[in-house]
Image (spheres, rainbow, N blue to C red):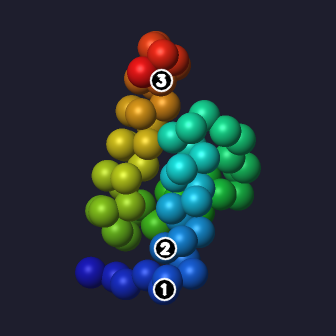
Amino acid sequence: MRMLTTHTRNKIENILKRLSDGQEVQLKERIELKKYSIYIPFIARKIAKAIDHREEYERNPFL
């Protein structure tokens, strides 16, 4: 399993939070997430959860 530095982990968490909240995520950041998700399954699961959260919020914004 590959390890992430604290800086990289914080950067990924920030991107995932914005993705989850429906905020703008740049193409460069999306490519970076994809790169990490290929090698680190934990990141792939976090991306899926962020997307699910965003879709749930879009369906019912009053939650």
Residue 58 location in percent, x, y?
52, 19
Q: Quadrant of residue 21?
A: top right
Q: What residue is shown with label 1? A: 5
Could you tell me the amino acid type at mark 1?
A: Thr
Which label belongs to residue 23? none
Q: Quadrant of the N terminus?
A: bottom left
- In this rendering, the answer to whether 17 lies above or below 24 is below
Residue at (42, 21) in percent of width and height:
63
Q: Nearer the viewer, residue 57 or 15?
A: 57
User: On the image, numbered disc 2 is attached to which residue?
Assistant: 9
Q: CA distance from mark 1 to mark 2?
A: 6 Å
Q: Are marks 2 and 3 in contact (CB under 8 Å)?
A: no
Give the mark nearer the N terminus: 2 vs 3.
Answer: 2
Q: Nearer the viewer, residue 53 or 43?
A: 53
Give the residue at mark 3. Answer: 57
Mark 3 or 1: in front is: 3
Q: What's under tag 2, amino acid-wise?
A: Arg
Residue 45 in sight from this viewpoint: yes
**Number of other residues with Cα within 10 Å of mark 2, as a class: few under 14, some 14 to 19, many 20 or more:** few
**Would you say 10 lies left or right of 43 here?**
right
Judged from the image, the secondary structure of the residue bearing numbered disc 3 is helix
Q: At numbered mark 2, what does the secondary structure look like: helix, strand or loop?
A: helix
Marks 3/1: CA distance?
31 Å
Q: Give the CA separation, mark 2 to mark 3.
A: 25 Å
Corner quadrant of residue 53:
top left
Depth check, front residue: 36 or 18: 18
- Report if the CB atoms under discs 1 and 2 are less than 8 Å apart: yes
Q: Position of residue 29 (x, y in %)?
A: 65, 57
Q: Residue at x 47, y 23 (%)?
A: 57
Q: Amino acid at mark 3?
A: Tyr
SS of the residue under disc 1: loop
Question: Residue 48, position in %: x, y?
Answer: 37, 43
